[in-house]
Image: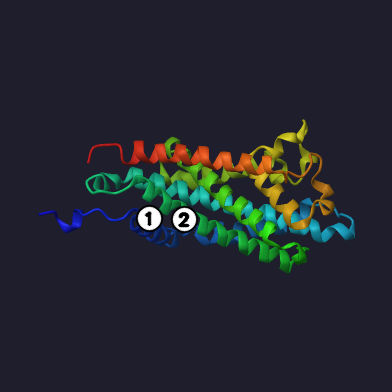
Amino acid sequence: MTNPRHRSVPWTGQARAFTRRHVQQLRRNKLLVFLAVGWPVLWYLLTMAIFIEAPDPDQLGYVKAANGITYGLFGAFTVTVAVFAGEFARDLEGDRYRKLRAIPVSPTADLAGRFVAGTALGACSYLVTILAAVAHGATFELERIGPTTVAILALTFVLFCVIAMALAMGLALVITKPEHMTTIAVVVVLMAFYLTGFNGITPGMIAEDPAFVNYLPNSLATRMQIAAWAGTDSVEFMTPPEAPLSLEYGALLVGYAVGLSAAAVGVMTRFAYGGEP
């Protein structure tokens, strides 16, 4: 007779269980509130107070909105990379997977649970930063919020978080000490942020041809969101290159997410669940 504890649980049930577990882990993380809320809002306020030259008054609201979006995604990038990579590295170091290998657990359900929990965390960070920008006088054109705009905002955000978490899994394999993960992840995010000209909204600060900001995931997602929400006529300050709103750019972002997700499945299957029980 089969032991009830070893009966196979449907994949969806496993994914929900892993999501609950990872959310509980994230809630216990002492750096969570700061990284998700204080960190991006602080950077937004510092940038607007110190690093942004006084623009045309007609453009000021759009500049604030653009920075709200870029720091919203910056915050989501930070928490998903730092926290997600840290938890995965901690599970590997603690040999938690030795127990899971002995029961019928799907590696992809574990991965899906991690991704859902990380995306929810990133969404909280993103929304808090957007609200801070609105309170600071950012101009978000509500009349532009139609089905197409909502679809672009939601799709780019989810894809961006999936890309960040997939990259974080690779980082967790390289940095095997969880206690070092947060610092290293924050440094990596800051480097990506500045090397792409504030996630692509200030291409003029890039010495060489800035066209690449339309092809790297962090700057591509940011520029797509700004152009979709603020309107291409209101964001001359982030051109050239042109705003990436064509289907080809959306397909590129999807391609990044699909390719990196496949790599993440390989990492989970090989390094987490591929050893001996």
Residue position marked by numbered label 1 in the rendering: 15
The kind of secondary structure element at disc 2 is helix
| Residue 90 place in picture, x, y as percent | 38, 47
Residue position marked by numbered label 2 in the rendering: 116
| Residue 129 place in picture, x, y as percent | 65, 61
Left or right position of 196 against 17:
right
Q: Quadrant of the N terminus?
A: bottom left
| Precedes in sequence: disc 2 or disc 1 | 1
| Residue 130 place in picture, x, y as percent | 67, 62
Viewer-proximal residue among 265 and 144: 144
Label 2 to label 1: alpha-carbon separation:
9 Å
Outermost residue on the top side: it is 208
Say which quarter of the image contains residue 144.
Answer: bottom right
Say which quarter of the image contains residue 145.
Answer: bottom right
**Are dots 2 and 1 in contact, CB under 8 Å?**
yes
Viewer-proximal residue among 187 and 258: 258
Residue sitting at x 55%, y 50%: 161
Left or right position of 82 against 98:
right
